[in-house]
Amino acid sequence: MSTTPQSVRTTDYHTAGEPFRIVAQDLPPVPGDTVAERRALALRLGPLDALRRLLVREPRGHSGMYGGFVVPPDDDGAHFGVLFWHKDGYSTACGHGTMALGAWAVDTGRVPASEDGDVPVRVDVPSGRVTATVHRAGGRTTGVTFRNVPTRVLAREVPLALSGGTVRVDLADSGAVYASVPARALGLDTTRASLPALVRAGREIRAALPAHEVYGVILYEDLPDTATGPHQRNVTVFADGQIDRSPCGSGTSARLVLLGDEGRLAPGDVLTHTSVADTVFTGRLLPDGITEVTGATHRTGTHTFVLDPHDDLGPGFLL
């Protein structure tokens, strides 16, 4: 066994409070002709998945960590591709991560940008090609708008028998499938005090919908409308009980098409979407299921993480 510590360099951002750890170097080879193929193979790639576990587990990460491996795009129409990862594996879509990647690409000069104005960063993700438009003013990034793949309503008011009674669930595919449920239907609100109960409910709802391969459960609450449209607060529970600290980028896309389907979001209206951490995304519904979500993203650090071969904890642990 080598006595030389393994190391990996990352750049970390947060988008509306949700972390995103970017790895663009020190990666093992990732086979596949497309980003979707690379995701399908990722769990079988020992060195790559070992790197994911190293970065998401304590003491270098935590169970709520999210990140991405930067890989080649599907073709020269995009600037790069990305494999999104979390503690349980690899997701097909990640809006907050796409927004962070847009800011990172401009901040590092990977995509040239002027001091002022907007610059589109095109990214191939497993669900398709998305765009992060980076807004610039005075030489700094002031926000990012994420334009998602087309989003569609899958089903409305699907009855689910849960331990506390029957609820009705709406399903939408925004690159990943999300189930939406009013928190009040479960006797809950979307405050921090309710998080343990919301996580339990999210897990139970997701487990009851295996045929739909639901990635996340959005437990939402209506707040008073703003002058520009609806206002909701949500807690998105994804993968195996992770809580999105942001209002959830691709989850906001799902809420936009559902609100449009209900007639509550007209052309030109803006959804104000608030997270449990009181951070905000704004979203618009465009024709043909296209959605745009805007928020703020900031760099939190650059790191060189090391795995000492003599460390008994190895790649770490999850609590």
Image (tube, helix red, strand yellow):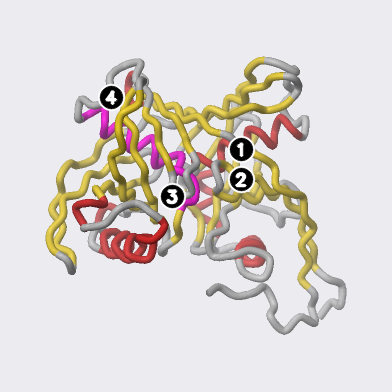
Point out the tag, 3 or 2, that comes first from the N-terminus: 2
Residue type, numbered disc 1: Thr
Q: Relative to residue 151, is residue 196 depicted above or below?
A: below
Q: Relative to residue 163, is residue 175 depicted above or below?
A: above
Closest to the camera, between mark 1 and mark 3, is 3
Numbered disc 1: secondary structure: strand
Residue type, numbered disc 3: Val
Q: Which residue is mark 2?
A: 14
On screen, residue 21 versus residue 154, left or right, reads: right
Residue 24 position within the rendered picture, expressed as x and y whole percent measured from the top left: 72, 46
Residue 198 sits in quarter:
bottom left
* Magenta residue span: 244-261
Q: Is residue 34 visible?
A: no
Quadrant holding the N terminus: bottom right
On screen, residue 79 versus residue 173, left or right, reads: right
- Residue closest to the eye, 124 or 121: 121
How far apart, in angstroms, are the residues tagged by discs 1 and 3?
Answer: 17 Å
Numbered disc 4: secondary structure: loop
Q: Which residue is mark 4?
A: 265
How far apart, in angstroms, are the residues tagged by discs 1 and 2?
Answer: 6 Å
Q: Which residue is mark 3?
A: 276
Mark 4–mark 1 CB contact (< 8 Å):
no
Mark 1–mark 2 CB contact (< 8 Å):
yes
